[in-house]
Amino acid sequence: MATVTGTVTVTGHLVDTGILARILDDVLEYGGDYRIESLDLGRQHEDESTALIQITADEAERLERILMRVQVHGANAVDPGTAATRPAPADGVFPDDFYSTTNLETLVRLDGEWLRVRNPEMDCGLVVTREGGGTVVRTVPVSDVRAGDAVVCGAHGVRVELPVQAPRGEEDDFGFMSSAVSSEKPQALLVRQIAERMREVKAAGQRVLWVGGPAVVHTGAAPAMVRLVRAGFVDVLFAGNALATHDIESALFGTSLGVDLAKGSGVPHGHEHHIRAINTIRAAGSIRAAVEDGVLTGGVMHAMVAAGKPFVLVGSVRDDGPLPDVFTDVIEGQRAMRAELHDVGFAIMVATMLHSIATGNILPASVPLVCVDINPATVTKLADRGSAQAMGIVTDIGLFLEQLARELC
């Protein structure tokens, strides 16, 4: 039976990070075969290794898919060739053999020149345009492609770059957190490391992105979050209807889900408070209007408005109300989130699985992120869905935010 072959090369700490094993596993899983032509192992602990791998498949289309797949791990074709483009056949439809992107730094070769892709994002296509007299390549989600757009097809002429790797045991302080998700770590040390990274990001003129769930309010951590906003360590907030609703409920009624946050007990008719809070904001027209009119005088959302910081609230089918600021069209919500990723140098995700995964899916791998949740599965699922840079802390969000506020404020 006739076969087709391609040769890829990959450089890095291939053995102790497990990259080489993952590449070979993916080749077999996608129906191909491999032969390691050479493996140059680093002699010293800090030295990188380089592998040359020949990949074989029974048809060209399968080989293309394998080559695209192994690029997730930084394996690039030895002879990359030149990228081919084809017009999108219709709005919201890529050509059948479109290049499916990773969240790694990506380059595309056109007319003999390597062009760096703008805004690397996983599970998108690459569209080539002319802007300002030059050629630009950017990631575009399938919902946003338009008929006739020049879409990169196949794996030829595409190269990815892995983030800089430190050999095992020689990570910086922040790398202490990059081991397997666990609650058995000195939390005070982790909080100090996160605080230091946030200070570095701010000093570099970059922004800190927060992704939050309603447990921020339920656990009584909203005052700590407010202090962080006022101190300038929350530059943009992504959340759903629930965090904003219960934060506003807390500010208006002193309860969250009808539970008195000062006493920890339910109050008469407390189950109505969240919907009455939503109704109050809807009557005002928006969260900002409620702040400006003096209706909303405290809480996280008040602090964000007062500080002039943007927030993006994207809802779900189970939402009550929702608040007038909430995006109910998830595609529009995604676009709004992407629009706020500029200059983000650090992301911290607290007590929300769905919004954490959604944000991880649109972040470049070069943006470090920390996920904090009492449930280890939240951090694990985030990493399993492609956000390999995710670092996890398993702890109570209320205690974590209070400690972080003390460190930074």
Image (cartoon, helix red, strand yellow):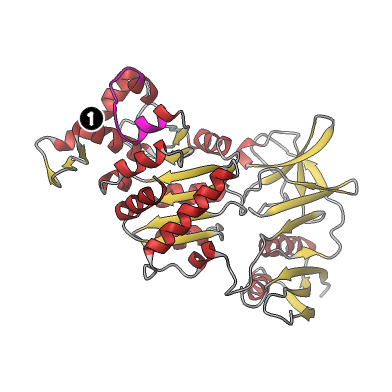
Q: Residue furthest top?
A: 293
Q: Is residue 301 magenta?
A: yes
Residue at image point 76% right, 34% down: 148
Left or right side of 404 for 347: right
Q: Is residue 144 magenta?
A: no
What range is drawn magenta here? 292-304
Image location of residue 119, percent across then percent down: 66, 44
Residue at image point 61% right, 50% down: 364
Relative to 104, residue 140 above or below: above
Left or right side of 231 for 114: right
Image location of residue 276, percent across then percent down: 22, 28
Image location of residue 229, percent across then percent down: 41, 38
Image location of residue 138, percent across then percent down: 71, 41
Name the residue type under label 1.
Leu
Q: Which of 133 and 316 lies nearest the eye of the viewer?
A: 133
Relative to 352, residue 241 above or below: above
- On the image, numbered disc 1 is attached to which residue? 252
Q: Quadrant of the N terminus?
A: bottom right
Q: Number of numbered discs present? A: 1
User: Dividing the picture into quarters, in which one does residue 386 lie?
Assistant: bottom right
Residue at image point 74% right, 79% down: 42
Relative to 265, residue 172 above or below: below
* Mark 1, other Cα within 10 Å: few <14 / some 14–19 / many ≥20: some
Left or right side of 83 for 297: left
Q: Residue furthest left?
A: 268
Q: Secondary structure at mark 1?
A: helix
Q: Quadrant of the C terminus?
A: top left
User: Dividing the picture into quarters, in which one does residue 12 lie?
Assistant: bottom right
User: Dividing the picture into quarters, in which one does residue 396 lie?
Assistant: bottom left
